[in-house]
Amino acid sequence: MTTWRKAQAERDARLEAGAKLARGKIVEARDATRLLEAVIRPGDRVCLEGDNQKQADFLARALTAVDAARVHDLHMVQSGVVLAEHLDVFDKGVAKRLDYAFSGPQSTRIARMLFGGKIELGAIHTYLELFARYFVDLTPNVALIVAVSADRDGNLYTGPNTEDTPTVVEATAFKDGVVVAQVNEIVDKVPRVDIPGDRVNFVVKSDKPFYVEPLFTRDPGAITEAQILTAMLAIKGIYAPYGVKRLNHGIGFNTAAIELLLPTYGERLGLKGRIATHWALNPHPTLIPAIESGWVEQIHSFGGEVGMEEYVRARPDIYFTGADGSLRSNRAFSQTAGLYACDMFIGSTLQIDLSGNSSTVTTSRIAGFGGAPNMGCDPHGRRHPSKAWLQAGKEADPDGPAPLRRGRKLVVQIVESFGDKNIPIFVEKLDALELAEKLDLELAPIMVYADDVTHIVSEAGIANLLLCRTATEREQAIRGVAGYTDVGRGRDRKMVQQLRERGAVRWPEDLGIDPLDADRSLLAARSIEDLVHWSGGLYAAPSRFRNW
Amino acid sequence: METFSYRHKADRRSTGSRAQAIVGVVASGNLEVLVERILPGTECQVEVSTPVTGFGAVWEAVIADFVERRSPGGLKLSINDGGARADTVALRLAQAVRVIEEEGR
């Protein structure tokens, strides 16, 4: 006889085993590893929560301590491979297979373990793509999540760092999985309910507050003149002519420079209210001067940012906040906003090839993708028009009939032609291809595909790939902004000159910009301390960024 | 340590009357440029001293572009490099010419 409740019965058996260690839903910290041994079965798909910001670090440590004879061959399906423990579970034989999105801090070790065959790799995803698979073919059997506080019914308060939690819980709890939460404290009543208690099976109070990385904090003191020049080029050469109002910024120093130039250089160009009003963006401290100067109307965030809590709480007209007053972030929704409701993504990268493919992978480092490829792509499901989107579409296809012409998302890569240690950003062949060969991957890890990228900005100028009609024109436009790299010096001077005349390449002088004006005095804030002043003392910079 | 010396003819003689100027600092990723108004006519000379080897072709291209764009006739520029990137070198050279062309200081 067919039974339709096999998964429910299995979940109930796990819950019964776990209940022996719990009082109600509460489990003592010292019993955390035993709890995991009780509810996780060999071969399970396990989501250990953690992204580029918050980490279920206590549960990660508990998982590394399980008896590998009982818990083994796990298939980890998680946003981030960020903590040492995320890889320790593979070294200890607890986990075997991995599907993930981001591995910034572990990029070197994960590369070594992949080469050594220690990890069976499913795929490297974007956040939204991995979330999508949670509902189709990578649904977790067990989710190990993290929140700020819980009540005794299991209602969770995630505070400003809600991030991935609702998505992970949705996929697990409604498909007969088990949800275990680590929390900083257990309270009588949570400040707001971010996760309803009937979706949470066990709660463990961790020995110390969970870790959050201030990944989106950029010290204005470290912004260089070259980065300021790229920011001036982007504002005058892209934001202004397309009238880009809805956008997402990456985490690099170039985009931080743009944020700090809005109230100075942008103001001087008369762009206030005409560009950069609506954002899918984390609470970047470097956006404070623009917000305080009245540039910004609304921001939805993927996650929180350490130190920005009180500032956000005091600016509810700008940010999404809950009934308790604090930020409500949600990575899945903000990624969706970045995909469908933004007219531009602008971010940095480590390598760009002659077609415009870009990658942050080098042969010894695999940093994963995070959200960039999702926002840095042209969504073919988009149906609503906007000035920027229509104008970009027209540039790509000037002769097509307007009512049938798709618009284009502006996907901008902003770089300096030479990166760290004088390593050229522009290359003939991406390291990602070599890596794909070495690891026998069917797909090279490309951050932004050539057919999605519309503009490349460097200190040498802007390449508008929408205006390039042939592969050769594209290559020469890229060479035309590749500065003094081998790729740049290998350009066909005559052809680049023709591309400049058509506006497909624009050098600083073509935009009326003198590189000598790219001065740090243009930055609305020149230090973290300046940002604190701009915020009226509300921004509490993390100690590692304080030097006063 | 590598040294290079380049001689060019500029389009025109640099303006202003200052005899010399210094911009930048010798620090990692940065450079110092000493500029002196000591050459006749539209002659220009650039001396490079760098701790990073193997970038001869890049120096040559940066300096050729600099002479074409900023026309530093009559100037000798001496670069004490701290491993700066090409775009930083181009910027400091341009700054050096701007400072020596400034009047009244």
Image: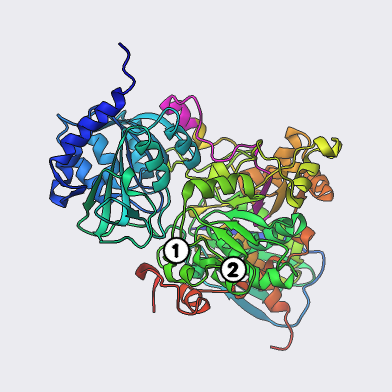
Q: Quadrant of residue A98?
A: top left
Say if A294 sits above or below B88 in the image.
below
| Badge number at residue A260 | 2
Q: Do the numbered discs 1 and 2 sit on residues whose CB atoms are within 8 Å?
A: no
Q: Name the residue under label 1.
A: A323
Assign the magenta stretch its main secondary structure: loop
Q: Look at the image and tell me whether residue A492 can be seen.
A: no
| Disc 1/disc 2 C-alpha distance (Å) | 31 Å
Who is closer to the viewer here, B59 or A8? Answer: A8
Q: Residue A145: x, y in percent?
A: 32, 46
Q: Quadrant of residue A205?
A: bottom left
Compared to residue A351, the image places residue A323 above or below, namely below
Q: Of helix, strand and loop, which one carries label 2? A: helix
Query: Residue A31 location in percent, x, y?
Result: 14, 46
The chain letter under disc 1 is A
Give the magenta part as a residue range: A434-460
| Residue A387, percent from left and from top | 76, 51
